[in-house]
Amino acid sequence: MLDAAESTPVDGAISASPKLFGRAPYHGDGGGLPSWHKSDPGLVHRAMAAAASPHCALMPEQLLPRLPRLVRASWNLKCLDDQGHKIQPTSGYVHLDHAAVAPWISLDAAGARNSIVIDIDHAGGPELVAQLPAEIRPHLVIDPYSGRSAAIFMLAVPVLLQTKNPKPRWLCDRVAEDLEDYFFTGYEDDDEPSKPKRRNATALRVGTLTKNPFGRIEELAGPQKRRKLPLGAAWPHPLWDWWQDVSGSNLVWHTIPGADSVFLEDVSEHLWQLRHEEDLVELPSRGKPFWAKSTEEVLDPKGRNDLVFRQLRGFAFRHAEQDGMALLEQALRFNSELDRPMDFGEVAGIARSVTRYMLTEYKPGQGDSWDRGVMQLQRTGLELPERQHLAALRTARVKRDATMEKLKGLIASWPEGQKLTQKALAEAADISIESVKRYWKKAR
């Protein structure tokens, strides 16, 4: 059954178990999603057979085993009817072997994000992709008529959408925003003059339909609605003549293959380098992931991670800083002051944690009161046990002084003719007789 094509996925089509997603990347046989395809391996094999084409450089076995059994697809997203009017777009969930050749599909599952897709509304996609390192280069699916394209970054580790831990989702969203900025070159005029100008590179939301590298021309519901490039650009695109007359392809799109899969940390690190290439001489490596570290590396006796975290948190509170890149730079400065600086990945994790708190939990004005307590021990740089000990000593002293003043006041106003005893004073002061005995000599 088909539904109106929206930009958000239909919930409940697939249930993804967190147990299926670990630290290891996918394998070519679909090993990353055992419960999706191991129970019915014939489905993915039929899909790969249907998508096989001598004109597609991207092999189906690189992409299709990563997709779920039911895939959101469309055959008329940007098509015209016989009268030249735009067809009302529709989409629906179909089995993988039927969706494999649909012109537009979603690469994500209902419970997990499998990809980051950047919709590039200019013809400069191939040049920008070529400047990226091979290990993080996306698959670029190009419209041969206009030169517009979709950059598909397949994630080595899917990002679960329904877990309590927000860190992977936060990192994925931030990387998507950075990639959008990377491919952005300006604003474009829409086909309809009444609409405002929009960015010519956009990160698609989870579940959004995009160009299918294996989409077939015969699967289109009608002629495609063509869009012109901005003034001054070649139109149709130089690729169009070759695509029509030379290639003999039955595919809707032309695909330039990229990396089989990418890690978010690698993409984030490279984009960070591009932003700071003038100031950064050498960037430390990400180091080993948490699961590969030894017990000694995880349980750092010097508490470097905690120290940088507390320093960065204090800096963020004092300056009400919410910009992630500014906090990362400050964290790197704190880290450089350590005797044994941490790896870049650990410092970036601290910066992400503080940034997320500042964006979601921080309230204006909180920065003025970050150093809590009258002693302001946070500024001393002492370790937490030492600060707690000093605070406890001050609390005990204040309590003793208050008790002493209370007893002196009661003794001074004690009624004449009434005998002053320790028991009577304890009852009047509402404290234990043991406390009165400790202060008896000094209070009289």
Image: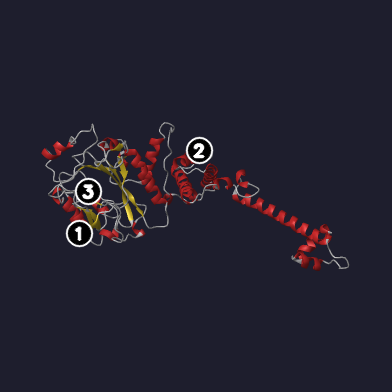
Which comes sooner in the sequence, label 3 or label 1?
A: 1
**Image coordinates for residue 151, horizontal then vertical, percent:** 28, 43
Between the residue at mark 2 and the residue at mark 3, the CA separation in whole angstroms equals: 44 Å
The kind of residue on which mark 2 rests is: Arg
In this view, 415 is above or below 151: below
- Label 1: state its secondary structure: helix
Left or right, residue 162 beside residue 219: right
Give 134 or 93, whichever is nearer the viewer.
Answer: 93
Where in the figure is residue 371, as x and y percent of width and height? 59, 47
Question: Which one is closest to the eye, mark 3 or mark 1?
Answer: 3
Mark 2 vs mark 1, foreground winner is 2
Q: Residue 42 carries which label?
A: 1
Amino acid type, residue under disc 3 in the picture: Asn
Q: Quadrant of the C terminus?
A: bottom right
Task: State the mark number for residue 333.
Answer: 2
Residue 302 showing in the rendered view: no
Q: Which of the pair 199/332 is nearer the observer?
A: 199
